[in-house]
Amino acid sequence: MCGICGELRFDGAVPNMAAIGRMSDQLARRGPDHAGTYQDGALAFGHRRLSIIDLSSHAHQPMVDAKLQLTLVFNGTIYNYRELRAELQARGYQFFSEGDSEVILKAYHAWGEQCVTRFKGMFAFALWDQRSSQLFLARDRFGIKPLYLNQTSHRLRFASSLPALLAAGDVDTTLDAVALHHHFTLHTVVPAPRTILQGVRKLPPASTLRFDPDGTVTEQVFWTLDATRPAQPLTETEWLAATREQLAQSVKRRLLAADVPVGVLLSGGLDSSLLVGLLTDQVADLRTFSIGFEDVGAGSEKADEFEFSDQIAQHFHTRHQQFSIPNHEVMERLPEAVAQMTEPMVSHDVIAFYLLAERVAKEVKVVMSGQGADEVFGGYFWYPEMDRTPGTPLERFSQHYFDRDHAEYLQMIAPAFQVGDVTSELIASELGKPRADEFLDQVWRLDATTLIVDDPVKRVDNMPMAWGLEVRTPFLDHELVQLAAHMPPGLKLKEGGKFPLKAIARGLIPDSVIDRPKGYFPVPALKYVRGPFLDMMRGILMSEACRKRGLYQRDYVNKLLANPEAPEHFTRINGSKLWHLALLEWWLQVHVDPLPAAP
């Protein structure tokens, strides 16, 4: 787990090493253990390392293999690196380090660009081939590791975060009107390759990008998710056995690929509790961590799940720590979280992850988390609602997922930024792709391959890595996701959703945790649009910078401010519409308005 950056010149000039330095400085919190740079002709790399596998200096990056004439910067973990290493050694390759980074170099030399299909893990890497002067970029199947791009006619820059590219300078920060429509319709999800800035793009998940010295650029997709039934039908018992075997293998991979202790972020829900149950026999003195927040008064929604996380910790005798955050700290620390956001994210979980990661990072460098289970195994309440709704796939999806319809969007956004209903066009196209048997198969494939990348996967990388904490997500193992995608939807929705996980958890974790209602973790200081939170949003939206930007129609802003807790001013899934507007404006003021001038 690290931060990577680089520059490739197209104009015969040498790379701007000062820009590399600024990007590396911006990425320092992702990799506090080592910093390195590399330059060869038109290419320069920067790297910030978080040491997890092979803690020695032999695994420092940029990693140069002088014999093979290959150089790498890599962010992530290849969980099956030991098996690949053994296979490569059998082919005659000799290794100078013990980690997974060198395996990528040798694998590329042995198998070329198709090496990525052999990697089981989360990764974003850049590989420079001195023999051919080619730059090769790759991103993992679910986009767990980020890779942002800024390309002009004379050079390419890339980095693990968008603010790192901004720090380098010379970025077109014009707002992308299409991306804004996605952002305000899909819970701040802006599917790759777009970001809200015209000058920054993202390498899509499961994709590679090659730059040749003659200017040719080749992008390829190396994996797609098949959401059809298997040719040979499975019984329920067979589906459950396969799920348990695949999940256990996924957990084991993520445990063994570390030379440091691995803990668990224990929410008290089914998913993280199941991870603890599967790890207990493999880890002595397993560390678990939970976070909760201060309630806002009698009769209010409970702001922690300690009742359930404590049950799991006691049941499995883990070394458990729980952190209770007062509401005043949430408000005090919110500016820090916004400053660390690689893209604007409105979910209340963002600040929760930021504050939890700060505390956990003092104890361990690696944790597992249950993110992805709901999207992969059908755990959210809107899936059965979508299934019962008549209409086209787009109509069934949009009624239960979109934060606002196109008509309301046009009332909100200023005329200069208005576009057609581009989000509906995108979603209809994605749902309509082949290799999905039923409507919910289409939805879950869309979730796993497109939507989940920006919510919640992005925050699970972004916020913990701001404290040098690596989060591993066993439910997003691509073989497990592929298994789940083949399942009949009725099997996943049985007993209120996530039936396969509930079934394999029986007898392993307490029934009280399995059968509890699904929790939607609140952060009271941000859930209720009143007091200091409301004052802060009013200040942002009424600021001179916001008015000058002219992004929002003032009548719409004033309507929200006049009655901020009106039911129609909330989305079913993602909270206050006022916060949606304020957060984007705040992010722009922090990251875009005060851009440093490039030398």
Image (cartoon, helix red, strand yellow):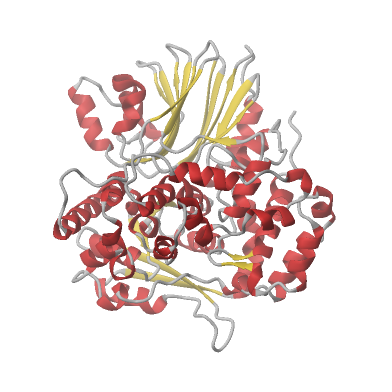
Q: Is residue 141 visible?
A: yes
- Name above or below for residue 33 compared with residue 398: above
Instruction: Quarter of the image for the N terminus: give it.
Output: top left
Is 304 placed left or right of 579 in the picture?
Answer: left
Q: Residue at x 69, y 70 (%)?
A: 533
Residue 457 visible in image: no
Relative to 475, is 301 above or below? below
Q: Farthest residue to the front: give it.
A: 391
Q: Is residue 577 above or below residue 259?
A: below
Between residue 96 and residue 221, name the one nearer to us.
Answer: 221
Observer-nearest of 104 and 120: 120
Q: Residue at 22% of width from left, 55% of height from top?
A: 243
Residue 469 lies left or right of residue 556; in this view the side is left
Quarter of image, res 336:
bottom right
Quadrant where the C terminus is found in the figure: top right
Q: Quadrant of residue 215?
A: top right
The mark tally for this picture is 0
What x and y, as percent, mark residue 412? 73, 56
Frontmost residue, 236 versus 132: 236
Residue 154, above or below 332 = above
Q: How far from the left and from the top, in percent, is residue 455?
A: 50, 53
Q: Which quarter of the picture shows residue 108?
A: top left
**Residue 170 percent across, percent down from the top left:** 71, 30
Give the image location of residue 56, x and y in percent: 37, 37
Q: Nearer the viewer, residue 43 or 183?
A: 183
Q: Residue at x 78, y 47 (%)?
A: 415
